[in-house]
Image: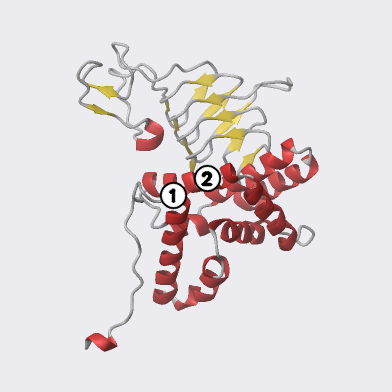
Amino acid sequence: MPAGQQQKHHQVPTYPPPESEDEESWVWSQIKAEARRDAESEPALASYLYATILSHPSLTRSLSFHLANKLCSSTLLSTLLYDIFLSSFSAHPPVCAAAVADLLAARHRDPACASFSHCLLNYKGFLAVQAQRIAHLLWFQHRRPLALALQSRVADVFAVDIHPAARLGRGLLLDHATGVVIGETAVIGNNVSILHHVTLGGTGKAVGDRHPKIGDGVLIGAGATILGNVRIGEGAKIGAGSVVLIDVPPRTTAVGNPARLVGGKEKPARHEDFPGESMDHTSFISEWSDYII
């Protein structure tokens, strides 16, 4: 085909982002480039991609619009939700930064995540977490009926039930997400990965601080249940189907060295990723003291 007649293809920037660029700006540029490419290759999605991504000047406006349309009902209007989401993102930059970190986490850790735009549009775990971050702001602004209404809509639409008071860190991945339940006083650290049908719950009807505390870099396998005010240490793995009722220590080697350090403290050969980042579910029970099966 002559050069002048060749079909134009939109170029998508290279992943990961250059260290010199602002992550939010880079991710938004990536999302728009992906949306243009997909609209060109699949005309049936062109209007949808324009309405949700390409017509918006920023990630916060696109995400607010998309969340509002996902969570609206006949009595909880999309225009109302859009205003709530956008004003919350605008007034609290760390919430937007956390959304960017969550997008990067999904793209980096999940081999099924084909693009940032795919995560933004289709990953219910990502969308549920962003809605909870807004509900969390509303909860501590004493707008609790609205926060609880959002929790209910998220549970109805995404099958993910996260209490508005729960504290979620950055770089959180809910992989598949169906059936995830996170209680009121739960705390989740940074760079944590949680698979489907995981429960971070209480042990009865007692009030107060009654839910798990999850350290940075933890990986929680599918169907795991962690109950009570227990602590899961930094870098621990919780195996699929586990029931955890006691504290799990931070991940360490059999000789007590930090889990990320390979080669000893004096001559470290390399640093291992935390399980929450590497997504390594394998058990080396003879080498690691904290893998729960």
| Residue contact between numbered discs 2 and 1, judged by CB atoms under 8 Å | yes
User: Secondary structure beneath disc 2?
Assistant: helix
Residue 237 position within the rendered picture, expressed as x and y whole percent measured from the top left: 41, 27
Residue that numbered label 1 is attached to: 23
Residue shown at 45% from the left, 35% from the top: 191
Q: Considering only order in the chain, which callout, 1 or 2, is on the residue closer to the N terminus?
A: 1
User: Secondary structure beneath disc 1?
Assistant: helix
| Label 1 crowd (10 A; few <14 / some 14-19 / many >=20) | some
Name the image quarter holding residue 2: bottom left
Which label number is shown at residue 97?
2
State the residue in front, 29 or 171: 29
Residue shown at 44% from the left, 23% from the top: 234
Residue type, numbered disc 1: Glu
Q: How far apart are marks 2 and 1 (CA)?
A: 9 Å
Is residue 105 left or right of 68 when viewed as pictured?
left
User: Height in image: 206 above or below 255?
Assistant: below
Residue type, numbered disc 2: Ala
